Image (cartoon, coloured by chain):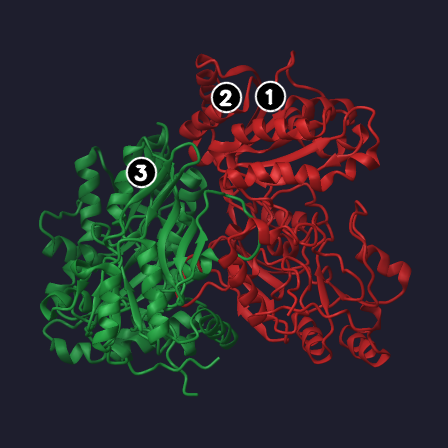
Chain colours: A red, B green
Amino acid sequence: MNIVQKPPATLSPETIAKFRAIVGDKYAVTDEADVHQYVTEERNLFRGTSPLVLRPGSTAEVAAICKLATETRTALVPQGGNTGLVGGQTPYGGEVVISMRRMDRLREIDTESNTMTVEAGMILQNAQNRASEADRLFPLSLGSEGSCTIGGNLSSNAGGTAALAYGVAREMSLGLEVVLADGRILNSLSKLKKDNTGYDLRNLFIGAEGTLGIITAATLKLFPKPRAIETAFVGLKSPDDALKLLAIARDEASGQLTSFELIADIAVDFSVRHGIGVRDPLASKHAWYVLMELSSSRDGISDTLERILERGMEEGIVDDAAIAANLAQRQGFWKLREEISPAQKPEGGSIKHDISVPVAAVPAFIAEANAAVVKLLPGARPVPFGHLGDGNIHYNVTQPVGANTAEFLARWHDVSDVVFEVVLRMHGSISAEHGIGQLKAADLPSVKDPVAIEVMRGLKAMLDPLNIMNPGKVLLPVKS
Amino acid sequence: MNIVQKPPATLSPETIAKFRAIVGDKYAVTDEADVHQYVTEERNLFRGTSPLVLRPGSTAEVAAICKLATETRTALVPQGGNTGLVGGQTPYGGEVVISMRRMDRLREIDTESNTMTVEAGMILQNAQNRASEADRLFPLSLGSEGSCTIGGNLSSNAGGTAALAYGVAREMSLGLEVVLADGRILNSLSKLKKDNTGYDLRNLFIGAEGTLGIITAATLKLFPKPRAIETAFVGLKSPDDALKLLAIARDEASGQLTSFELIADIAVDFSVRHGIGVRDPLASKHAWYVLMELSSSRDGISDTLERILERGMEEGIVDDAAIAANLAQRQGFWKLREEISPAQKPEGGSIKHDISVPVAAVPAFIAEANAAVVKLLPGARPVPFGHLGDGNIHYNVTQPVGANTAEFLARWHDVSDVVFEVVLRMHGSISAEHGIGQLKAADLPSVKDPVAIEVMRGLKAMLDPLNIMNPGKVLLPVKS
């Protein structure tokens, strides 16, 4: 059961030559300047090195790479769009990076079965577009959709803004094709909604962050394209009231409620202040806001939205609300939401968390985390926002006005400790959407059931006995 | 990797005494007459023997049982309501049966988070009722709901009539408590909709039919209770037309389409002929029928249903339709559907299959399977019906009129062979809902990707190295 992380072997020229031969020289990257984009990520938070980046063009090539990696005990780091936020796609140093982006074909779309089979390197937005061209919806939607890939989405079990109605990435996949560490190809591609022939292997690889195998293709669920979308931006007094509004919205709209985003006033302030072209849709200020969206395959949901807001006003929950009158206004509401993340940068250092708690516990979580953070660092500015309907809050903390950014960021772990204490007390998760990767691998044993960790280590040892698949991510090595 | 099925050890009186001491004499069943109900099932298709049936009352007792079973290498068969259709819950001979029915407590219901945590032995109908009392819906619904248990539903990943909108049992569970073969308790109970902290362990045990561990409790998702339900019984010409009507219904109703059942004329005939109080809602006969239901948390879906039927008539798909005007009529439509299974018995022997194919392939599957079966056994009467929206057909074959039942049933495997040949050619599943159990364990290697079988065997060896958890179910022993 002991997973010992081998120090990355220095690849011999012979081994490099063998790897190059699998993909062809054109798709084997060794020049340091070219390698750079694969070993660093956008925010420069995680940096690594790699002697070799391979860009396979087929499942057979990925299988040959894994087989050779097993023979030569070469550590591999699978990578999609390189947009992950926890360092899961970044090598520590010396691993071979497998960039999946060339494998971006649509293998099949079946509008009667409402399924689409795509290769892992297809960019999420392209998958959305392929579905849309067939008059279908592929609902997964997140900030990085222009560059992240389906393989990365599944490996990290991405969430995003549509998870309330459609679930997370895990729930949008019917089957997978996976290359195992030793090069065997597991073919569990399937268009079947019901298949009870043996253990569920698909969900073993979804969310495993490339540590158990490399996802090379997936069959995805498609949905009817919504014909009508109604969006409201609501001002209210508290997360408690937002929770009450959520209950009303679910009661009235049920599955037609497709987004329900909670936003603190400071997040709206930041977005309006720093986001280009962002404006507050409401005339006056409120302590909290909700961005709510209904989608339907037919008309009639403007009535539903109005009824939700009316009930909210009657019950004293909704203080003010704006309904998007056209597509431009709707895009404006979402622009405000999307600019919250970048708008924190001009305000100085930001210590970020991606937590979830039971939906009912969100108000208490925010109150207690705010109190704990401000007690630890007086003047620190909590910026909570996120997917209330999923209990998922991006609990960010911006530095005090005028503070030294480096000194503030040096307190990252202290701040996380007090936030995670509240999360764990409420039976929440320290990583709702983003995964464990490098960033939280050391935290995992202290937040997870010890038997769960033992079973995870058993799975890792069974599927990757040499620990060559993205070593040191999710599970840290155990001293044997 | 080799799983060798040990011949069931004869339990020594000392070992039996130790097992009895865990649950107390009152809950240890050894009298043959009392054991009988646990080692046979309703249809008497699967029969076994057991020296001891244990009825634990707590997770701690289940853990102690598994620990002792590991120490004494005693094979265990976990059992819920004993309603499974593939012999998964029946001992072969000599295993100790663990009946979970006493563990039937509601641990918690949280209407804000829309979750409910129940013990594995809670009967499905009771779980539905607990949710309903809290003004929520637990949507899992199947024929045996009055006696099957949540633990059995999850272990077999049950489907049922609401899977179209709400998914199968797997998709209704957020977290599990599981006792592993060696007695360790895995606590993955969780109310979280998003939690990306490590590998997904829940789905490993859901659908594993008790071969990897014993599910002792589960956190289940709750949904808003529908306020309006509209049901139609439709006559049409072909499965192709039914598929077109499904597309219209999904287009108009989207997530509000909660059932879409396809029924062959012969199934309606049988149900009307043999079902007490069953009548055909339509004035004249049709080759095929659809039972369609829409559910909504608000009014307005009668318009939607009418629009679906209007479009169907305009396009020449719908020949006739009846809409339930009241609850009694709705119950009458469903009664017709539910009586299809029992109504086959008075017609003689019935060879049953529970298959799925991609939704688009259902019409071709039915046509080709019918042709193959009738070619094999002239006069045999195919009775296809099932969940068209899930691609899941209960493909039953009734004996020719006047044939010898025993002789007909002796051809079960021959009939299955020709049916499965069509299923596999269409990339379908030989077990959509019911699982593998004893019935299909020998078939599994020939219908499943060989690498998938290898990974399944690896999982089994990792979690149950002594092969004491429901041995010989799902995976047959390999000669070492």
- Asked if residue B414 is positioned above or below residue B184 in the image, the reply reads below
Q: Is residue A334 visible?
A: yes
Chain letter, disc 1 residue: A
Chain letter, disc 3 residue: B
Give percent across and percent down for residue A180. Answer: 61, 71
| CA separation in Å, label 1 and label 2 | 9 Å
Q: How many residues crowd mark 1 within 10 Å: few (<14), some (14–19), many (20+)?
A: many
The disc placed on residue A241 is 2
Q: What residue type is labelled 3?
A: Ala
Give percent across and percent down for residue A178. Answer: 59, 67
| CA separation in Å, label 3 and label 1 | 31 Å
User: Relative to the observer, which residue lies in front, B183 or B258?
Assistant: B183
Q: What element carries label 2?
A: helix
Q: Residue at the spot x=51%, y=59% of the render?
A: A203
**In the rendered view, does B214 fall on the left or right side of B347?**
right
User: Relative to the observer, which residue lies in front, B391 or A62?
Assistant: A62
Q: Name the residue under label 1.
A: A288
User: Relative to the observer, which residue lies in front, A116 or B288?
Assistant: A116
Q: Name the residue under label 3.
A: B131
Q: How many residues crowd mark 3 within 10 Å: few (<14), some (14–19), many (20+)?
A: many
Give percent across and percent down for residue A118. Answer: 61, 59
| CA separation in Å, label 2 and label 3 | 24 Å
Quarter containing the C terminus of chain B: bottom left
Closer to the N terminus: mark 1 or mark 2?
A: 2
Which picture quadrant has residue B356?
Answer: bottom left
Same chain, marks 2 and 3?
Answer: no
